Image: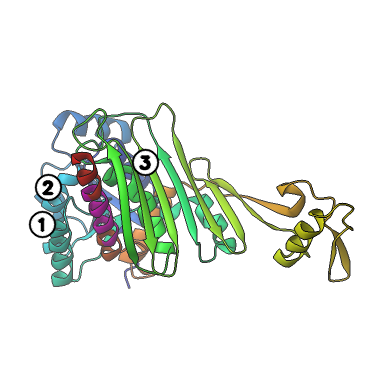
């Protein structure tokens, strides 16, 4: 088990890579050895802002670290990950793992050959709201998500499904315990040559359904997801790090509600009551949803999800915890995302 600080580097210090470097520079258990970017002017800017050490080349950085964060454009993931893994360097690769399943498979094969760890940067797994709702989350039967963002050049090298929707795909795939059986999808290229807005419907074995919408041509930002299950439903605002759980009030059951509905169908219906634990629950006077349900609000602890993700990666590298989002997880999300992109392509063509 590794107890000394993990020597780590960051490859790619654009918008997201900058924040990886910022957090790692002061993170216990990490020694930020250096950062590298193919753009000298951007590298100099980040070095000046954060006071971190630049590396003259990718090889020079990889030769001096135990682990590396890869935050380059998706098309370059494989080109950076393979030389790292061939040296036995552990990698945290920003999502998606690669632009193709072939690339993902080559990355995973290189990791198996040297025993290096691969973690994928599906950062929403570490969202404070999602962590706070875990005590209430059961087997969802229907999931609905909306992930909307204004247009920005970053990330447009891939379809919006791989840029944005894949966050929610990973969440859904990690929560639904059955395989995906049916996928239908539509999308439209609005400002780029690939879909900028997309909707996908996934049907799982066992009857679960997920309806996911992602857009990078919205006028406002939104990151919301709702889980509907037999015990109630959970609504999360992932951007705000908070949510609520709505469930029937104690003593109220579906059977009592059915009796109430039957009673209200007749003129002069009697008051319908149910008893739970000695307390009588009056139902006849209920006029809406809020009379029947209790709302459990929860807020996350305010911890930065990216910091949680990096802490989990360090723990995995140091042998104190398993990898929370494995390379296989990343490949599975990529496979579904690419199938959605394919369905959208066929829809647009027709």
- The magenta segment is 332-342
Q: Earlier in the sequence, mark 3 or mark 1?
A: 1
Outermost residue, front direction?
Answer: 267
CB under 8 Å between callouts 1 and 2?
yes
Closer to the camera in the image, 95 or 307: 95
For mark 1, what is the residue?
83
Apparent side of residue 261 relative to residue 148 in the rendered image (left or right)? right
Nearest-to-viewer mark from 3 and 1: 3
Residue occupying image coordinates x 50% and y 62%:
140
Pointer 3: what residue?
214
Could you say which is closer to the camera, residue 2 or residue 341?
Answer: 341
Which of 42 and 100 lies nearest the eye of the viewer?
Answer: 100
x then y, percent, for residue 286: 80, 50
CB under 8 Å between callouts 3 and 1?
no
Q: Main secondary structure of the magenta part?
A: helix
Element carrying mark 1: helix
Real-space Cα separation, disc 1 to disc 2, in angstroms = 9 Å
């Amino acid at each position: 088990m590794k107890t000394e600080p993990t020597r780590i580097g960051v490859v790619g210090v654009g918008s997201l890579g900058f924040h990886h470097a910022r957090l790692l520079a002061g993170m216990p258990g990490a020694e930020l050895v250096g950062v590298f970017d193919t753009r000298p002017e951007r590298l100099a800017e980040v070095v000046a802002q954060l006071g971190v050490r630049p590396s003259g080349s990718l090889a020079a950085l990889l030769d001096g670290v135990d682990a590396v964060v890869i935050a380059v454009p998706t098309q370059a993931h494989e080109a950076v990950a393979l030389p790292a893994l061939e040296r036995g360097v552990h990698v945290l690769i920003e999502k998606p793992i690669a632009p193709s399943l072939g690339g993902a498979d080559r990355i995973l094969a290189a990791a198996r050959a040297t025993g290096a760890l691969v973690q994928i940067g599906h950062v929403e797994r570490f969202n404070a709201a999602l962590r706070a709702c875990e005590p209430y989350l059961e087997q969802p039967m229907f999931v609905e998500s909306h992930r909307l963002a204004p247009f920005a050049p970053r990330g447009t090298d891939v379809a919006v499904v791989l840029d944005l929707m894949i966050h929610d795909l990973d969440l859904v795939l990690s929560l639904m315990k059955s395989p995906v059986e049916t996928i239908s999808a539509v999308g439209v290229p609005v400002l780029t040559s690939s879909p900028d807005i997309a909707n996908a419907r996934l049907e799982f074995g066992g009857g679960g359904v997920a309806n996911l919408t992602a857009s990078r041509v919205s006028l406002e930002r939104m990151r919301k997801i709702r889980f509907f299950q037999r015990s109630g439903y959970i609504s999360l605002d992932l951007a705000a790090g908070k949510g609520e759980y709505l469930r029937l009030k104690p003593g109220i059951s579906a059977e009592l509600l059915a009796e109430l509905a039957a009673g209200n169908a007749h003129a002069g219906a009697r008051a319908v009551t149910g008893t739970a634990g000695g307390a009588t629950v009056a139902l006849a006077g209920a006029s809406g949803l809020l009379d029947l349900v209790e709302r459990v609000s929860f807020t996350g602890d305010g911890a930065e999800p990216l910091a949680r993700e990096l802490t989990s990666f360090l723990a995995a590298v140091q042998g104190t915890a398993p990898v929370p989002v494995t390379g296989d997880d990343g490949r599975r999300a990529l496979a579904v995302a690419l199938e959605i992109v394919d369905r959208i392509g066929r829809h647009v063509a027709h």
